[in-house]
Image (tube, grey):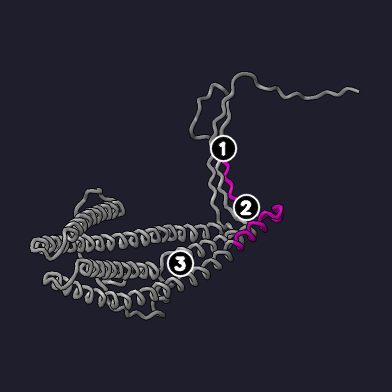
Amino acid sequence: MFTDAYIIPVPQGKRRFSGGQLQIRESLFEGGRTFFNLMKARKEKESAQQDIDVSQLEIVYQIHQQYYQILANTRRVELANKVLEQRIEQLRLARARHAVGSVTMLDVMQAEIDKGNQENTLMTEENNLRISRMELNRLMGVSLDTEFEMVDEFETSVPSFDEGLLVKRAKDGRPDLLWLRSREEVAEKEVWVQRASYLPSVTLDLFFFRSEQGSGENPFTFSPENEDTRLSLNLDWQFFSGFSRYSSNKTARVDLDNLRYDIRERELQVEKEVKEALMNLVSVYQQSLITQKNRQLASENLRLEQERYRLGSSSLLDLRTAQVTYIEAETGHINKILEFNTSFAALEKATGLKLRD
């Protein structure tokens, strides 16, 4: 059976379409992820600065160590010069006594050997001083040939510190502990970021559309007549993620717990370092009192032996023995002062504090 049908004619030829759209989307709520990410970024910035402070503390410690090494080498050069003067005087006396027949030529030859050996010692100490100065310049990042005046602080002082107070201040302000605590805060924010992934997100969309359609004879227009405006509120809530959110939450929590264990371990390490550094400082100071006394006794003993040798009542062997004792006592005291100052620098590093004015 056939029926009549009305067919709508389709216009032929060119057609023109003008249109434009604008869509604005604003996130109203993301489960707090944006907020916690912002807080996390701030803590990461603080952590980066504290990491710099840790490196700075280590560099300052190395510079202090090298500074005191230069002062010690300077004292060793002074001692070598002083001993060389003694060797020259010893050679003069040996020649004078040989001239009158009171000693053999062996004494003169031995005195010349001792003088030559001391000249070599002096050159070695001067070279060590130059090398230590170059190392300090390297640590400070300046030209290796830079010359500057050294302030002589090569001395000891009575260490009168409160151990408990030093430990407390170290735990409160040492850069490496502050860095770990800032990392703990970053990890805490990461835990909240991962928790927020369970919450829904809410967005607001504003959609604006204008269009116009006509024949090809009409010109293109930037002001279409048809308008369409839409406003929508969208709720996006993911109920199942293949346990990825659960895994991320657990990982963030484990990282936080590990950091807290690290902080506790570091606090115990800091306490040990402070107590150990203070005990070393006190011990070295007490030893320096002994080396100071030995130094004075050795100097007086050498003076008496030099006088006895000059008068002919002592042998060259006795004089050389007194000189060796004197050199050992002076060197031992220099080394002990160096150890005291480096121990003081180690205490400053252990506490993270500047303990000298």
Q: Amino acid at mark 3?
A: Leu
Residue drawn at 22 percent across, 48 percent down: 145
Kind of element beneath mark 1: strand
Residue sitting farthest toward the front: 101
Kind of element beneath mark 3: helix
Residue at label 2? 234
The answer for how far apart the CA atoms under marks 1 and 2 are is 26 Å
The answer for how far apart the CA atoms under marks 1 and 3 are is 66 Å
Q: Is residue 102 above or below residue 200?
A: below
- Contact, CB < 8 Å: mark 2 with mark 3? no
Kind of element beneath mark 2: strand
Question: Which of the two residues, 27 or 51, is positioned nearer the viewer here?
Answer: 51
- Contact, CB < 8 Å: mark 1 with mark 2? no
The answer for how far apart the CA atoms under marks 2 and 3 are is 45 Å
Residue drawn at 64 percent across, 19 percent down: 12
Q: Say which quadrant the N terminus sits in.
A: top right
Determine whether, in the image, residue 284 is placed left or right of residue 257: left
Q: Is residue 143 above or below residue 76?
A: above
The numbered disc on residue 226 is 1
Q: Is residue 214 above or below residue 103?
A: above
- Crowding at label 2, few (<14), some or many (≥20) Cα neighbours within 10 Å? few
- Can residue 154 be seen in the rendering of this structure? no
Question: How far from the left and from the top, in percent, is residue 71?
Answer: 24, 63
Point out the tag, 2 or 3, that comes first from the N-terminus: 3
Q: Which residues are magenta?
A: 227-254
Residue drawn at 16 percent across, 58 percent down: 105
